[in-house]
Image (tube, coloured by chain):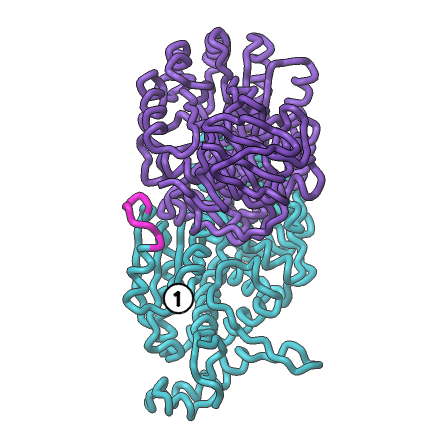
Chain colours: A cyan, B purple
Amino acid sequence: MARRIPSRYRSYRSLIERGTLKSGDRQRWREWGRTNVEAVATKPVNTQTGSRVKWNRKDLLGLEDLTVEEIELILDTAESFKEVSTRAIKKVPALRGKTIVNLFFEPSTRTRTSFELAAKRLSADVLNVSSSTSSVVKGETLHDTLANIEAMKTDMVVIRHLSSGAPHFLAARCRSSIVNAGDGMHEHPTQGLLDMFTIREKLGRIAGLKVSIIGDIAHSRVARSNIWGLVKMGAHVTVCGPATLLPPDIHKMNVTVASNLREALAGADVVYVLRIQLERQNGKLLPTIREYVRFFGVDKEKMRAAPPTAIIMHPGPINRNVELASDVADGPNSVILEQVTNGLAVRMAVLYLLAGSEVTDETSD
Amino acid sequence: MKLLIKGGRIVDPASRRDFRGDILVSDTKIEKIGENVRAHADRVIDADGLVVAPGFIDMHVHLREPGYEEKETIRTGSMSGAKGGFTSLVAMANTNPPIDNAGMVDFVLTRAKETAVVKVFPVAAVSKGLEGKELTEAGELKEAGAVALSDDGHPITDSELMRRALEYAGMFGLPIIVHSEDPQLAGNGSMNEGFNSTVLGLRGIPKAAEEVMLSRDLSIAELTRGRIHFAHISTARSVELIREAKKRRLTVTAETAPHYFSLTDDAVRTYNTNAKMKPPLRGPEDVAAIKRGLADGTLDVVATDHAPHTATEKEVEFDVAPFGIVGLETALPLIITELVEPGVLSLMDAIAKVTINPARILGLPLGELKEGGVADIAIFDPDEEIVIDASAFASLGRNTPFHGLKLKGHALYTIVGGRIVVDEGKLSVP
């Protein structure tokens, strides 16, 4: 079967003919879909050649692989979805009849909730499967776990796993689209996307901005996804953290390594504070949390080194008054809750685009 | 039974001979080697265009029996070796139970005699239960047939135990094969520490984990004048340290494995668990240094560290997959393609790394072609291109990063004690 973009969003008539839409959806679809998502999902990117960028990936595994055009497509698509959540009826029929599984091998409330709500607002059926232990511990392989889920004819699997590369392992072996919702210390692409969306929304652009990422870079999938995405989009990324929490050769990802917090904050347009895993404090990576707070905790006093316009971001959940002081987290420059709001729109866009890249037999309409 | 190998390029590193000639094998021994041997033979192998070398010796394999027969058995491992041109395998002690007493050495030798198609020489543990606490009975182990001692897979962290083991084993002339790794520095890393581990979000094993233990053991070798053989050297600095130690006439030898001169940690970029082994694949500068070390003799031996695992064990998340890859059936083509073809080593020197050098380190009367000597012979085509096909391996292990690769060098005949066990590239024994 050929893999191609389905035509289902191009013509309303064909949707009715193929039974994708019921006539009752007509009004809602007219109001929203054709004028909104359809327009951006085929947004012209090259005005000279007139070629249109489209989504044709089966999976979203990381931002390392994405092109600037693909990132822009997701962000633009998310913009149209953001409006859906402001309506009285917060639902569109885009993924009606699709089954999305949230397969979470690591406890996560906010990412899972965000994906679940995103799927529901697109009218997909959602199944949540959680397991706090690795499948290997249970004696079942990860592949078996997914094969069993796929046997129920699911369309998309959103996976959170403690092992880096687990989504890649599955994507290579499964028919379903795989969305990486965070794998080990590797990537968390939707977090990176929602952060870029928020930066673009708040500051109007990404290119040329100084974005400083502060904290435990070594163990952070959020940092990696943000670095890949932001650098691609033309931002100047600076990382800052204790030497024990900086990964080797991080500068080769085209970031600046600041030697202290003051240097990282100076001139920053965005101050991105990472969560410190309190369990890291095993005496080898950090002497004490107290010392971390003193040298790397972002508070009002230290923020005086940053421009007054710098926005504050955090992937949540915050350890208040550890990596981020409450007065800064709740202050006027904080966009932390907007990140959460945008996360929903970005995840809707991702699910929507991935569903649209599905295999179809239809040639054209 | 007489076997005549005719018209091959005979390469024997022990005598530094490289000439076109014939070899007459009579029963288990080589009767005659010469430019034109005339004899009535029951079987004639036309070796025109082929290289006739001493049977290869792999001084570092894991045959898994007893205890892990689902990964490999002495029989399947020996068949895998035979297909790769190996006539002798030196089997590591980390079985279950481990080879840490004379009875277990005897078990391996008995099983080998009953089932193996090539020779198997057991290595016994340095410490009881591979626990790194108490010495094994080296004297008895030697008498039972162990050719070396090693806790391979389990670094000896107790420096005093290392010292005493060298002193004690030295009394019986047993070398100690050392797996140089500082377990704390290696932590629960699963690949080389560097840019690739940063990008992949995998915990790294720094090169220093190998080098600090190697440095320690060089100091202990100096203290004890003991015989250490360093296993699977993977870093540039390790090569330098050994080079310097040899200059100072320490009695140390070293090996590397084919993957350390063929691959870098880029091979991990797809989370391929068949590129996961210990020590891990390193950077390009290390690969270059390993090649230099082989070329100048710092690294005496190429050994495969053949480490079979089941597909089920390897078909998992990268960080939970076991370490190790199989190597017996890819060693020769990798040596030819990566070392001989590019001119890193002459064919003669390359063959020495898998024949006379390991034989001398272990004190085995093997690894050379001489009249009256044992007829362990490998015949291969150095020019034939083959495509590595893991599914065709005789080993139970399919865990190789080289599957699908086109390489040069095909082992065609393997003769063990005068018996043809691989004939025209195929196993010829029941």
- In the rendered structure, does residue A141 fall within the stretch colored magenta? yes
- Name the image quarter holding residue B213: top right
Q: Residues within 10 Å of mark 1 (few under 14, many from 20)?
A: some
Asked whether the viewer can see residue B60, the reply is: yes
Q: Amino acid at mark 1?
A: Arg
Asked whether the viewer can see residue B290, the reply is: no
Looking at the picture, tell me which residue is in the foreground, A162 or B133: B133
Q: Position of residue A237 (x, y in %)?
A: 64, 52
Left or right: where A293 falls relative to B121: right
Looking at the picture, tell me which residue is in the foreground, B86 or A137: B86
Q: Residue at x 48, y 85 (%)?
A: A363
Looking at the picture, tell me which residue is in the foreground, A4 or A278: A4
Q: Position of residue B245 (x, y in %)?
A: 65, 17
Residue B347 sits above or below residue A327 on the image: above
Q: Which residue is mark 1?
A: A175
Left or right: where A306 falls relative to B120: right
Q: Position of residue A130 (x, y in %)?
A: 30, 54
- Name the image quarter holding residue A27: bottom left
Left or right: where B143 falls relative to A48: left
Which span of residues is magenta-colored? A136-143
Q: Residue at x 58, y 52 (%)?
A: B406
- In the rendered structure, does residue B180 fall within the stretch colored magenta? no
Q: Position of residue A10 (x, y in %)?
A: 49, 86
- From the image, give the main secondary structure of the stretch colored magenta: helix
Q: Secondary structure at mark 1?
A: loop
Location of the C terminus of chain B (image quadrant): top left
Residue B209 sits above or below residue A316 on the image: above
Q: Chain of mark 1?
A: A
Q: Residue at x 57, y 26 (%)?
A: B368
Q: Residue at x 59, y 47 (%)?
A: B266
Residue A332 sits above or below residue A121 on the image: above
Location of the N terminus of chain B (image quadrant): top left
